[in-house]
Image: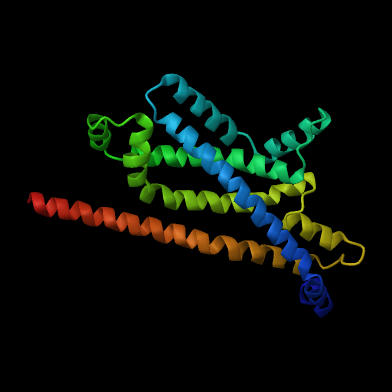
Amino acid sequence: MSGLFSARAWNKIWLYRNTFLLGLANTLKTAVVALFIALFLGIVFGLMATSNKKILKAISRVYVEVIQNTPVLLQMCFLYYALAFSGHSPGIFVTGFLALGVYTGAYMAEVIRAGIEAVPKGQFEAAQAQGFSYIGMMFYIIIPQSIKIILPPMTNTIVNMIKNTSCLYIVGGADLLSLTYSFVTGENTGGSYAPAYIVCGLIFFVICFPLSTIASAWENSLKKRERKATLNVGATEA
Protein backbone atom coordinates (compact mmCIF):
# COMPACT_ATOMS: atom_id res chain seq x y z
CA MET A 1 0.00 0.00 0.00
CA SER A 2 3.01 2.31 0.26
CA GLY A 3 2.74 3.15 -3.43
CA LEU A 4 -0.77 4.46 -2.91
CA PHE A 5 0.46 7.17 -0.52
CA SER A 6 3.79 7.79 -2.22
CA ALA A 7 4.24 11.43 -3.22
CA ARG A 8 6.86 10.30 -5.74
CA ALA A 9 4.40 7.90 -7.41
CA TRP A 10 1.68 10.54 -7.70
CA ASN A 11 4.18 13.07 -9.00
CA LYS A 12 5.16 10.57 -11.69
CA ILE A 13 1.50 10.32 -12.69
CA TRP A 14 1.36 14.11 -13.06
CA LEU A 15 4.61 14.29 -15.04
CA TYR A 16 3.35 11.66 -17.50
CA ARG A 17 -0.28 12.82 -17.53
CA ASN A 18 -0.22 12.99 -21.32
CA THR A 19 -0.12 9.19 -21.36
CA PHE A 20 -3.51 9.08 -19.66
CA LEU A 21 -4.88 11.90 -21.80
CA LEU A 22 -3.82 10.01 -24.93
CA GLY A 23 -5.48 6.86 -23.61
CA LEU A 24 -8.64 8.83 -22.90
CA ALA A 25 -8.63 10.33 -26.41
CA ASN A 26 -8.13 6.90 -28.02
CA THR A 27 -10.87 5.37 -25.86
CA LEU A 28 -13.34 8.09 -26.82
CA LYS A 29 -12.40 7.84 -30.50
CA THR A 30 -12.93 4.09 -30.46
CA ALA A 31 -16.24 4.47 -28.61
CA VAL A 32 -17.60 7.13 -30.98
CA VAL A 33 -16.81 5.20 -34.17
CA ALA A 34 -18.08 1.95 -32.63
CA LEU A 35 -21.26 3.77 -31.59
CA PHE A 36 -22.06 4.77 -35.18
CA ILE A 37 -21.53 1.16 -36.29
CA ALA A 38 -23.68 -0.11 -33.41
CA LEU A 39 -26.49 2.35 -34.15
CA PHE A 40 -26.51 1.37 -37.83
CA LEU A 41 -26.59 -2.35 -37.03
CA GLY A 42 -29.10 -1.81 -34.22
CA ILE A 43 -31.53 0.03 -36.47
CA VAL A 44 -31.16 -2.47 -39.33
CA PHE A 45 -31.55 -5.61 -37.20
CA GLY A 46 -34.14 -3.98 -34.93
CA LEU A 47 -36.32 -3.25 -37.95
CA MET A 48 -35.72 -6.75 -39.29
CA ALA A 49 -36.81 -8.21 -35.93
CA THR A 50 -40.13 -6.34 -36.10
CA SER A 51 -40.87 -6.97 -39.77
CA ASN A 52 -43.53 -9.35 -41.04
CA LYS A 53 -41.03 -11.49 -42.94
CA LYS A 54 -39.94 -14.63 -41.11
CA ILE A 55 -36.57 -14.83 -42.87
CA LEU A 56 -35.64 -11.30 -41.73
CA LYS A 57 -36.74 -12.09 -38.18
CA ALA A 58 -34.68 -15.28 -38.23
CA ILE A 59 -31.54 -13.49 -39.49
CA SER A 60 -31.92 -10.83 -36.81
CA ARG A 61 -32.44 -13.46 -34.10
CA VAL A 62 -29.34 -15.41 -35.15
CA TYR A 63 -27.20 -12.25 -35.13
CA VAL A 64 -28.43 -11.18 -31.70
CA GLU A 65 -28.13 -14.62 -30.09
CA VAL A 66 -24.68 -15.41 -31.50
CA ILE A 67 -23.17 -12.04 -30.62
CA GLN A 68 -24.77 -11.71 -27.17
CA ASN A 69 -23.84 -15.25 -26.15
CA THR A 70 -20.17 -15.09 -27.07
CA PRO A 71 -17.64 -12.91 -25.19
CA VAL A 72 -16.60 -9.64 -26.78
CA LEU A 73 -13.00 -10.64 -25.98
CA LEU A 74 -13.40 -13.73 -28.15
CA GLN A 75 -14.85 -11.66 -30.99
CA MET A 76 -12.00 -9.18 -30.69
CA CYS A 77 -9.37 -11.92 -30.69
CA PHE A 78 -10.99 -13.52 -33.72
CA LEU A 79 -10.95 -10.28 -35.69
CA TYR A 80 -7.38 -9.45 -34.74
CA TYR A 81 -5.58 -12.79 -34.63
CA ALA A 82 -7.59 -15.01 -36.97
CA LEU A 83 -7.64 -12.38 -39.71
CA ALA A 84 -3.99 -11.50 -39.05
CA PHE A 85 -2.91 -15.11 -39.64
CA SER A 86 -4.92 -15.11 -42.84
CA GLY A 87 -2.95 -12.10 -44.04
CA HIS A 88 -5.80 -9.61 -43.60
CA SER A 89 -5.07 -7.96 -40.25
CA PRO A 90 -7.50 -5.10 -39.67
CA GLY A 91 -5.21 -3.33 -37.18
CA ILE A 92 -5.84 -2.57 -33.52
CA PHE A 93 -8.12 0.43 -33.88
CA VAL A 94 -10.18 -1.09 -36.68
CA THR A 95 -10.47 -4.24 -34.56
CA GLY A 96 -11.84 -2.11 -31.75
CA PHE A 97 -14.29 -0.27 -34.01
CA LEU A 98 -15.64 -3.46 -35.57
CA ALA A 99 -15.68 -5.73 -32.52
CA LEU A 100 -17.31 -3.19 -30.22
CA GLY A 101 -19.65 -1.96 -32.95
CA VAL A 102 -20.88 -5.45 -33.83
CA TYR A 103 -21.13 -6.51 -30.18
CA THR A 104 -22.98 -3.39 -29.05
CA GLY A 105 -25.13 -3.46 -32.19
CA ALA A 106 -26.73 -6.70 -31.00
CA TYR A 107 -27.84 -5.02 -27.78
CA MET A 108 -28.96 -1.91 -29.67
CA ALA A 109 -31.08 -4.13 -31.92
CA GLU A 110 -32.86 -5.58 -28.90
CA VAL A 111 -33.43 -2.13 -27.41
CA ILE A 112 -34.88 -0.85 -30.68
CA ARG A 113 -37.02 -3.97 -31.12
CA ALA A 114 -38.44 -3.60 -27.62
CA GLY A 115 -39.09 0.11 -28.19
CA ILE A 116 -40.94 -0.53 -31.44
CA GLU A 117 -43.03 -3.32 -29.93
CA ALA A 118 -44.02 -1.03 -27.04
CA VAL A 119 -45.83 1.32 -29.43
CA PRO A 120 -49.60 0.59 -29.42
CA LYS A 121 -50.75 -1.65 -32.29
CA GLY A 122 -53.30 0.94 -33.28
CA GLN A 123 -50.49 3.21 -34.47
CA PHE A 124 -49.33 0.51 -36.90
CA GLU A 125 -52.84 0.00 -38.20
CA ALA A 126 -53.41 3.75 -38.60
CA ALA A 127 -50.15 4.14 -40.52
CA GLN A 128 -51.02 1.24 -42.83
CA ALA A 129 -54.47 2.70 -43.41
CA GLN A 130 -52.82 5.94 -44.50
CA GLY A 131 -50.83 4.03 -47.12
CA PHE A 132 -47.37 4.21 -45.52
CA SER A 133 -44.79 1.63 -46.58
CA TYR A 134 -43.09 -0.40 -43.83
CA ILE A 135 -39.96 1.81 -43.85
CA GLY A 136 -42.01 5.01 -44.05
CA MET A 137 -44.26 3.84 -41.22
CA MET A 138 -41.25 3.08 -39.03
CA PHE A 139 -39.33 6.30 -39.61
CA TYR A 140 -42.25 8.73 -39.67
CA ILE A 141 -44.72 7.18 -37.22
CA ILE A 142 -43.36 4.38 -35.03
CA ILE A 143 -39.71 5.20 -34.23
CA PRO A 144 -40.41 8.85 -33.25
CA GLN A 145 -42.92 7.54 -30.69
CA SER A 146 -40.53 4.85 -29.41
CA ILE A 147 -37.55 7.19 -28.89
CA LYS A 148 -38.57 8.08 -25.32
CA ILE A 149 -38.67 4.35 -24.53
CA ILE A 150 -35.46 3.53 -26.38
CA LEU A 151 -33.14 6.27 -25.12
CA PRO A 152 -32.70 5.27 -21.42
CA PRO A 153 -31.62 1.65 -22.08
CA MET A 154 -29.65 2.81 -25.12
CA THR A 155 -27.68 5.19 -22.89
CA ASN A 156 -26.86 2.30 -20.54
CA THR A 157 -25.71 0.27 -23.54
CA ILE A 158 -23.40 3.12 -24.56
CA VAL A 159 -21.94 3.21 -21.04
CA ASN A 160 -21.20 -0.52 -21.24
CA MET A 161 -19.58 -0.03 -24.62
CA ILE A 162 -17.27 2.67 -23.24
CA LYS A 163 -16.20 0.30 -20.46
CA ASN A 164 -15.73 -2.51 -22.98
CA THR A 165 -13.09 -0.45 -24.82
CA SER A 166 -10.76 -1.77 -22.11
CA CYS A 167 -10.96 -5.15 -23.89
CA LEU A 168 -8.56 -3.72 -26.50
CA TYR A 169 -5.90 -4.43 -23.90
CA ILE A 170 -5.97 -8.07 -24.99
CA VAL A 171 -4.69 -7.18 -28.47
CA GLY A 172 -2.20 -4.56 -27.30
CA GLY A 173 -4.35 -1.54 -28.00
CA ALA A 174 -3.67 2.12 -27.23
CA ASP A 175 -6.82 2.64 -25.18
CA LEU A 176 -6.85 4.02 -21.64
CA LEU A 177 -6.37 0.70 -19.85
CA SER A 178 -3.66 -0.48 -22.26
CA LEU A 179 -1.65 2.72 -21.88
CA THR A 180 -2.09 2.55 -18.11
CA TYR A 181 -0.58 -0.93 -18.14
CA SER A 182 2.27 0.29 -20.36
CA PHE A 183 2.82 3.12 -17.89
CA VAL A 184 3.06 0.92 -14.79
CA THR A 185 5.41 -1.54 -16.53
CA GLY A 186 7.55 1.04 -18.34
CA GLU A 187 11.27 1.33 -17.68
CA ASN A 188 11.04 4.97 -16.61
CA THR A 189 7.49 5.03 -15.28
CA GLY A 190 7.04 1.59 -13.74
CA GLY A 191 6.06 0.95 -10.15
CA SER A 192 3.21 3.40 -9.64
CA TYR A 193 0.59 0.67 -9.83
CA ALA A 194 -2.01 1.88 -7.33
CA PRO A 195 -2.02 5.56 -8.36
CA ALA A 196 -2.06 4.73 -12.07
CA TYR A 197 -4.99 2.34 -11.87
CA ILE A 198 -6.87 4.68 -9.54
CA VAL A 199 -6.48 7.49 -12.08
CA CYS A 200 -7.56 5.13 -14.88
CA GLY A 201 -10.63 4.11 -12.89
CA LEU A 202 -11.50 7.71 -12.03
CA ILE A 203 -11.37 8.70 -15.70
CA PHE A 204 -13.78 5.89 -16.61
CA PHE A 205 -16.00 6.90 -13.70
CA VAL A 206 -16.08 10.56 -14.76
CA ILE A 207 -17.20 9.51 -18.24
CA CYS A 208 -19.66 6.77 -17.33
CA PHE A 209 -21.29 7.96 -14.09
CA PRO A 210 -23.00 11.04 -15.58
CA LEU A 211 -24.35 8.96 -18.47
CA SER A 212 -25.64 6.28 -16.09
CA THR A 213 -27.24 8.94 -13.88
CA ILE A 214 -28.94 10.57 -16.86
CA ALA A 215 -30.26 7.20 -18.07
CA SER A 216 -31.60 6.35 -14.60
CA ALA A 217 -33.26 9.74 -14.16
CA TRP A 218 -34.71 9.51 -17.66
CA GLU A 219 -36.16 6.06 -16.98
CA ASN A 220 -37.66 7.14 -13.64
CA SER A 221 -39.20 10.20 -15.30
CA LEU A 222 -40.72 8.01 -17.99
CA LYS A 223 -42.23 5.65 -15.39
CA LYS A 224 -43.72 8.61 -13.49
CA ARG A 225 -45.30 9.95 -16.68
CA GLU A 226 -46.76 6.53 -17.46
CA ARG A 227 -48.21 6.21 -13.94
CA LYS A 228 -49.65 9.73 -14.17
CA ALA A 229 -51.17 9.00 -17.59
CA THR A 230 -52.70 5.77 -16.25
CA LEU A 231 -54.21 7.59 -13.28
CA ASN A 232 -55.60 10.31 -15.54
CA VAL A 233 -57.21 7.72 -17.81
CA GLY A 234 -58.69 5.94 -14.80
CA ALA A 235 -60.08 9.20 -13.43
CA THR A 236 -61.60 10.09 -16.81
CA GLU A 237 -63.29 6.68 -17.12
CA ALA A 238 -64.63 6.98 -13.60
**206 sits left or right of 23 in the view:** left
Name the foreground residue: 83 vs 33.
33
Name the foreground residue: 29 vs 178.
29
Residue 93 % position (x, y): 73, 46
Q: Residue furthest toward the right?
A: 187
Residue ID at (42%, 37%): 113
- When the figure is inspected, residue 41 is found, relative to residue 5, above or below; the finding is above
Res 197 seen here: no
Q: How is the image coloured?
A: rainbow
Q: Residue furthest toward the bottom?
A: 7
**237 sits left or right of 82 in the view:** left
Q: Quadrant of residue 63?
A: top right
Residue 57 % position (x, y): 45, 25
Name the foreground residue: 105 vs 4.
105
Q: Quadrant of residue 131?
A: top left
Res 136 seen here: yes
Residue ID at (76%, 69%): 195
Residue ID at (69%, 44%): 96
**45 sits left or right of 185 in the view:** left
